[in-house]
Amino acid sequence: MLKENYDMVAEKVRAACERSGRNPEEVTIIAVSKTKPLEDVVELSRHGVTDFGENKVQELCSKYEAIENPVRWHLIGHLQTNKVKYIVDKVALIHSVDSLKLAKQISKEAVKKQVTVPVLIQVNVAEEETKFGLESTDEVMELVQETAKLPNISIQGLMTIAPFVDDPEDNRKYFRQLKQLFIDIDKKNFDNVTMKILSMGMTNDYEVAVEEGATMVRVGTGIFGARNYNI
Ligand SMILES: *Cc1c(COP(=O)(O)O)cnc(C)c1O
């Protein structure tokens, strides 16, 4: 069942690429396994799925320790500085860098563990008060420049969480805005900054996000089914 769901998402990504003249190989589907059992991850990984997303450090670490197949773990949720040390050598990508304080901590722990950590800067395009992420272009530019000076941390792109809306078309303007910012930063040619990953789109709106240039979509419910937070 999980594999069928995953394949359906992959098919929709492929169709969205076709509609927008893109190569489907440019888009990575991250299976967001938060709250779901390890067995689900194992099952999908046996079918060749390689990229999984978690939003809690503890859950990421316990799945990381338990799984034998090599998979790439993505930390997609808000990261507290005191938890950075647990994951710097376990994650393929941190999607949610939204402050210089956090970037400095990642850099510090990465130096200690002698790894380089790829990160995305999280932008709050919709300027929703409840969400994390930077709101203005100036703030993003400044964080990008300051983070780029730090050792053992490498900025690879931008991430956003669009609002939950009934009609995914309502989020197209935000995806377009993030893509434009991505292009603007790329043009500045900052040292130690590459704009190659645009992480946007979730179950509700990933097709629109792909049409607007997403290179990573983070899909949970659409692959694993609804989450139950009460267990
Ligand atoms: C939970 C989560 C997702 C996946 O959400 P779905 O709507 O279930 O696809 C994607 N991104 C982030 C940051 C999340 O926390």
Image: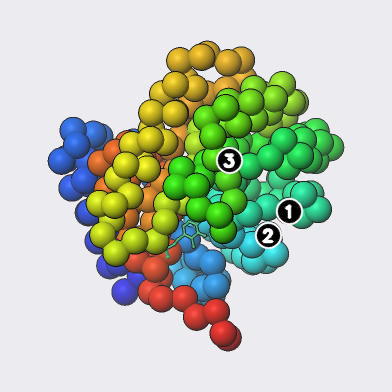
Which residue lies under the disc numbered 2?
A: 57
Which dot, 2 or 3, sits closer to the camera? 3
* Label 1 or label 2, whichever comes before in sequence order: 2
Q: Which amino acid type is marked by label 1?
A: Gln
Which dot, 1 or 3, sits closer to the camera? 3
Picture residue at 64% right of the left edge, 30% below the top: 143
Question: How far from the left and from the top, in percent, is residue 135?
Answer: 54, 40
Q: Is residue 95 left or right of residue 173?
A: right
Q: Secondary structure at mark 2?
A: helix
Q: Which amino acid type is marked by label 2?
A: Val
Q: Residues within 10 Å of mark 1 (few under 14, many from 20)?
A: few
Question: How far from the left and from the top, in percent, is residue 62?
Answer: 67, 66
Which dot, 1 or 2, sits closer to the camera? 1
* Label 2 or label 3, whichever comes before in sequence order: 2
Q: Is residue 39 above or below residue 102?
A: below
Which residue lies under the disc numbered 3?
A: 134
Using the rendered view, name the quadrant where residue 130 is placed: bottom right
Q: Which amino acid type is marked by label 3?
A: Leu
Whether residue 66 is visible: yes
Q: Residues within 10 Å of mark 2 (few under 14, many from 20)?
A: some
Question: How far from the left and from the top, in percent, is residue 41?
Answer: 49, 66
In front: 10, or 166? 166
Picture residue at 18% right of the left edge, 33% below the top: 21
Q: Quadrant of the N terminus?
A: bottom left
Residue 80's label in the rendered image is 1
In front: 208, or 12? 208
* Label 1 or label 3, whichever comes before in sequence order: 1
Q: Residue furthest right?
A: 112
From mark 1 to mark 3, how far is it between C-alphas?
A: 16 Å
Q: Is residue 175 above or below residue 179?
A: below
Q: Quadrant of the C terminus?
A: bottom right
